[in-house]
Image (cartoon, helix red, strand yellow):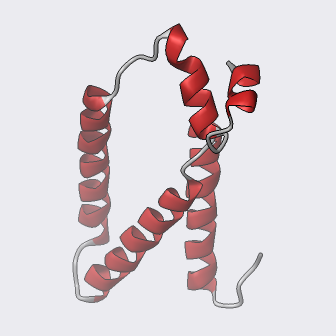
């Protein structure tokens, strides 16, 4: 999809990239990625339009991202083999038949 407005087109490409990267890395969560990306882009445009330095905004986003990833890694836990069916079933919409095939 190409948008006529070049700025909107860049935003759309950024959101598509976020969704694609999420799908490639996690296989799920694309809707969350799109919503977060849209919010970050919208707020970024507002503060830059109000005179904020875009380089500093970018650095702040990158620093915050690193901190959030670190926190999420700290909250995560390894999945035991016995839990794989449950994880796969939840990812398959609580379908345990598919969960068993995947695990």
Q: Which residue occupies 32% across, 38% down? A: 69
In front here: 53 or 36?
36
Q: Quadrant of the C terminus?
A: top right
Q: Quadrant of the N terminus?
A: bottom right
Give the x, y percent position of residue 51. 22, 85
Residue 25 location, quadrant: top right
> Vertical placement of 36 versus 96: above or below?
below
- Can residue 103 be seen here? The reply is yes
Give the x, y percent position of residue 63. 25, 47
Q: Which residue occupies 46% across, 72% down? A: 38
Q: Is residue 35 left or right of residue 60?
A: right
Give the x, y percent position of residue 94. 62, 40
In front here: 50 or 102?
102
In front here: 88 or 37?
88
> Vertical placement of 95 versus 34: above or below?
above
Extreme-top residue of the structure: 81
> Vertical placement of 11 versus 56: above or below?
below
Residue 42 location, quadrant: bottom left
Q: How many marks?
A: 0
In front here: 6 or 32?
32
Residue 41 location, quadrant: bottom left
Q: Is residue 41 left or right of residue 90?
A: left
Q: Which residue occupies 31% across, 50% down? A: 62
- Can residue 25 be seen here? The reply is no
Give the x, y percent position of residue 86. 55, 26
> Vertical placement of 53 versus 94: above or below?
below
């Amino acid at each position: 999809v190409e948008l006529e407005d070049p700025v909107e087109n860049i935003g759309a490409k950024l959101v598509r990239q976020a969704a694609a990267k999420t799908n490639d890395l996690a296989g799920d969560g694309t809707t969350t990625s799109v919503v977060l990306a849209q919010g970050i882009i919208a707020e970024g445009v507002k503060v830059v339009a109000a005179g904020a330095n875009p380089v500093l905004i970018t650095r702040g986003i990158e620093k915050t991202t690193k901190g959030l990833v670190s926190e999420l890694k700290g909250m995560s836990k390894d999945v035991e083999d016995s839990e794989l069916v449950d994880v796969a079933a939840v990812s398959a919409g609580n379908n345990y038949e598919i969960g068993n095939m995947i695990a």
